[in-house]
Amino acid sequence: MAYDLLRELFGLRDLVDILAVAVLIYVLIHFLVISKGYKLLRIFILVGLFWLLAEALQLKTLSWIFEKVWTLGLFAIVVVFQPEIRKALAKIGEQTKVLKLSSVEEKTIERIVRACRFMSDRQIGALIVIERYQSIDDIIEGCVYIDANVSVELLITIFYPMTPLHDGAVVIKGERIAFASCVLPLSRSADLPKKYGTRHRAALGISEESDAIAVVVSEETGEISLAVEGKLERNLDPEILRDRLTKLMGIENEGS
């Protein structure tokens, strides 16, 4: 009899409903943890506990307030974690899209490496962003439209001191220099040493908010760095830079 009563009160639909809510909560908590949103996670847990207490004590006004706060909190997650959400959506796109890279991209990488070698030897500051699957048009600002073939001479000319376009980033799409003098979002990472300036923070920032690759040449030391997936690889020689770019662009898998 108790079993029949339980079946009437708790059916398959209720079980599915509970499991769906549990999965949703797990995904939300996991996302907050991996995105380092610990403080926000603690606030949500605290609000949730107070909300449950208000419901148990049937405090209608307080329950209504917590319900509205919870709705605003979900909206805040979307706003605060917009870069992480954008990157997650980009990764989903990567899994459903086949990228074909030809020998033209190999030549493009070779030209980028040669230009970086030249500028590194002469301590000419540079910031080169290579777009991959995800468009970065909505992230970059203040760009000058170029639309020219990638060449060693053009890259060096753009970044040569005192030229109009040297202060900013070059954006490369495929085999073309799409933009120059671009303003990139700056990383707020506390892990970046203070000796690295705006160029490195911008390179790290664009790699945090997209799947783009950023190559930096320091004008103070001539050091070459590579920013990808929110991490900065420092002090690369041109050969290592070539190997990393080739691997990141998937060229080594071509024809396999």
Image (cartoon, rainbow, N blue to C red):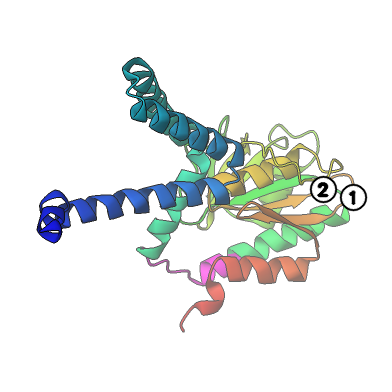
Within 10 Å of the Cα at label 1, are there few (<14), some (14-19), or many (20+) other Cα atoms? some
- Residue at point 75% right, 35% down? 163
The image quarter containing residue 19 is bottom left
Q: Is residue 197 visible?
A: yes
Within 10 Å of the Cα at label 2, are there few (<14), some (14-19), or many (20+) other Cα atoms? many
* 42 part of magenta stretch: no
Q: Residue furthest top?
A: 61
Residue 65 rendering spot, x and y as whole percentages: 38, 19
Element marked by disc 1: loop
Determine whether, in the image, residue 17 is placed left or right of residue 250.
Answer: left
Contact flag, marks 1 and 2 (Cβ < 8 Å): yes
The quadrant of the rendering that contains the N terminus is bottom left
Residue 137 rendering spot, x and y as whole percentages: 48, 40
- Above or below — where is 12 with respect to 179? below
Name the mark on residue 165. Answer: none
- Residue at point 44% right, 35% down? 78
* Residue annotated with mark 2: 218
Q: Give the residue type that dot 1 points to.
A: Thr
- Residue at point 80% right, 39% down? 197
Name the mark on residue 221. Answer: 1
State the extent of the magenta-drawn residues as a range: 97-107
| Residues at marks 1 and 2, CA–CA distance in whole angstroms | 6 Å
Q: Give the residue type that dot 2 points to.
A: Ser
